[in-house]
Amino acid sequence: MSEKNLKVDNPVTIAYQAANKETGAVVISEIYLPTGLKDLVGFPDVTLVERDASGSYAGSFTPDDVGDWVVLTHKADGSGQIMKRYSVGSHNLQSVGDDVNTIQGVATTIESKVDLLDSKIGVLDTPPMCS
């Protein structure tokens, strides 16, 4: 099982750099499900948008299942093909880190409340001073 770099139901950015910084191209990404099949109804081909005059194009899709998704990106005439695998899981490194930070925050709050309670108990344990 491979490390899951992306989280299910979160958008995935597709980036494409055209050879020789070609501008004005029509660039398409074909989305393949973890099963290896295409679902043109649920995941139609994505036409990437040119970002700037450097031949850089971008688009996105949102995986709805865990597994390895494959995206084949190319110019409309089929040239310039690149294939990229996106490993999608129910959690990714960022979401696990966020969960750990939340737990650490809760633990710190509990520790401070225990310290406060200990100091109040310490006051109650001190015998009264007689004069």
Image: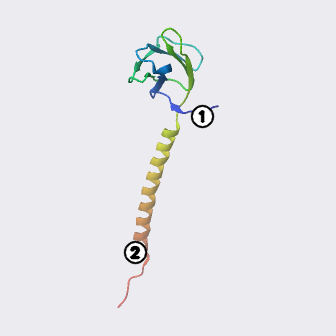
Secondary structure type for disc 1: loop
- Foreground pick, 111 / 82: 82
- Which residue is painted at 51% across and 12% down in the image? 39
Secondary structure type for disc 2: helix
| Residue 18 in view of the camera | no
In the picture shown, does residue 78 fall above or below 12? Answer: above
**Gap in angstroms between the C-alphas marked 2 and 1:** 52 Å
The N terminus - image quarter: top right
Q: Position of residue 87 (x, y in %)?
A: 56, 28
* Mark 1 surroundings within 10 Å by alpha-carbon count, few (fewer than 14), some (14 through 19), many (20 or more): few
- Foreground pick, 63 / 25: 25
- Which residue lies most toward the right here? 1
Asked if labels 1 and 2 touch by Cβ distance under 8 angstroms, the answer is no
- Which residue lies most toward the top here? 77
* Disc assigned to residue 123: 2
Q: What amino acid is at disc 1?
A: Glu
The C terminus - image quarter: bottom left
- Which residue is painted at 44% across and 52% down in the image? 106
Q: Which residue is mark 1?
A: 3
Mark closer to the observer (2, 1) = 1
- Which residue lies most toward the bottom here? 131
| Residue 72 in view of the camera | yes
Q: What amino acid is at disc 2?
A: Val
- Which residue lies most toward the front here? 20
In the picture shown, does residue 81 fall above or below 98? Answer: above
